[in-house]
């Protein structure tokens, strides 16, 4: 919906196909903004993207943004709220961004509502009960429909989304902290400590708690989450070090 730059691919299949993040430059209100389409986090066992792969992709994105993060735009499809909504909110906002980045909500699929904005009035309490709070919301349709039957609603929705982004982008982007194993020496100490931990049947220490917490929130058991978290983190560090 957003104008300017390359157009993002749209997928209408039942299974999501977004594996890695994509960057798009968009002109919104005269401001050139970097918009990132992130990996999917709802695929489950039957989908094309596993939870660990999705979490790895998200972590690499967050760590690869030299200029930080200014806004999270959480897009959900209405009119019904899915059970995964709270998990995704926790993943992005609470775990990876540590509640330090403003988050706004965009609800799509409301083209058949007589009053799209009325949807939020009726459903805001359900989000609050799940502990999900947002700096702003936009109830929209993201399609013009067959024969452009929703063209007017689509254009109104475009304006809503643009205003939502411009009004809530923070002027001081947030940068994620370095983490325990950021330095070479720190990684060396933790890695060797974990070798001893396995020998003496102790808990493996994790390099990046955000990855560990994200994996645990997806139902992965403690020991496996610790192993996967370190594997994902060290893979990212290796790719970063070889690039630089």
Image: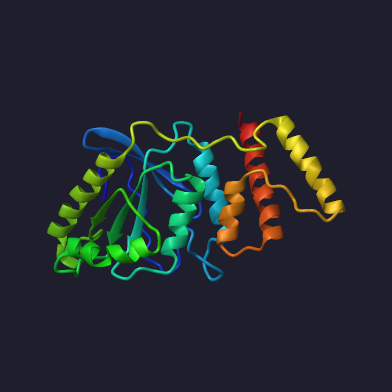
Q: Is residue 195 left or right of residue 33?
A: right
Q: Which residue is the extreme one toward the top?
A: 244
Residue 120 in the image: state x and y as whole percent.
Answer: 24, 62
Residue 79 in which image quadrant: bottom left
- Up the image or down, 110 lies above or below 135; here it is below
- Up the image or down, 135 lies above or below 221; here it is above
Q: Nearer the viewer, residue 44 or 49?
A: 44
Q: Is residue 27 left or right of residue 131?
A: left
Q: Is residue 40 left or right of residue 229?
A: left
Residue, x 61% and y 47% (percent of image)?
A: 209
- Quadrant showing the C terminus: top right
Q: Is residue 181 visible?
A: yes
Residue, x 33% and y 32% (percent of image)?
A: 171
Residue 91 in the image: state x and y as whole percent.
Answer: 49, 54
- Up the image or down, 198 lies above or below 172; here it is below
Q: Is residue 52 visible?
A: no
Residue 107 in the image: state x and y as whole percent.
Answer: 29, 60
- Up the image or down, 141 lies above or below 113; here it is above
Residue 105 in which image quadrant: bottom left
Residue, x 34% and y 62% (percent of image)?
A: 127
Residue, x 40% and y 34% (percent of image)?
A: 173
Residue 203 in the image: state x and y as whole percent.
Answer: 76, 53
Q: Is residue 170 left or right of residue 94?
A: left
């Amino acid at each position: 919906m957003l104008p300017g730059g390359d157009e993002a691919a749209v997928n209408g299949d039942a299974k999501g196909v977004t594996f890695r993040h994509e960057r798009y430059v968009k002109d919104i209100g005269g401001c050139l903004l970097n918009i990132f389409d992130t990996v999917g986090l709802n695929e489950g066992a039957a989908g094309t993207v596993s939870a660990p792969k999705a979490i790895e992709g998200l972590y690499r994105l967050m760590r690869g943004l030299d200029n930080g993060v200014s806004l999270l735009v959480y897009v959900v499809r209405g009119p019904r709220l899915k059970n995964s909504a709270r998990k995704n909110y926790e993943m992005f906002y609470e775990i990876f961004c540590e509640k330090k980045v403003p988050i706004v909500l965009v609800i799509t699929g409301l083209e058949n509502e007589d009053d799209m904005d009325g949807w939020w009035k009726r459903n805001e309490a359900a989000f609050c009960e799940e502990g999900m709070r947002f700096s702003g919301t936009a109830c929209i349709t993201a399609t013009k429909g067959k024969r452009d039957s929703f063209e007017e609603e689509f254009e109104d929705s475009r304006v809503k989304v643009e205003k939502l982004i411009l009004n809530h982008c923070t002027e001081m982007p947030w940068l994620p902290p370095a983490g325990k194993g950021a330095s070479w020496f720190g990684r060396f100490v933790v890695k060797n400590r974990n070798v001893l931990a396995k020998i003496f049947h102790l808990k493996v220490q994790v390099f990046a708690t955000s990855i560990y917490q994200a994996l645990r929130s997806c139902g992965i058991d403690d020991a496996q989450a610790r192993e996967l978290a370190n594997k994902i983190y060290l893979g990212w560090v290796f790719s970063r070090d070889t690039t630089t």
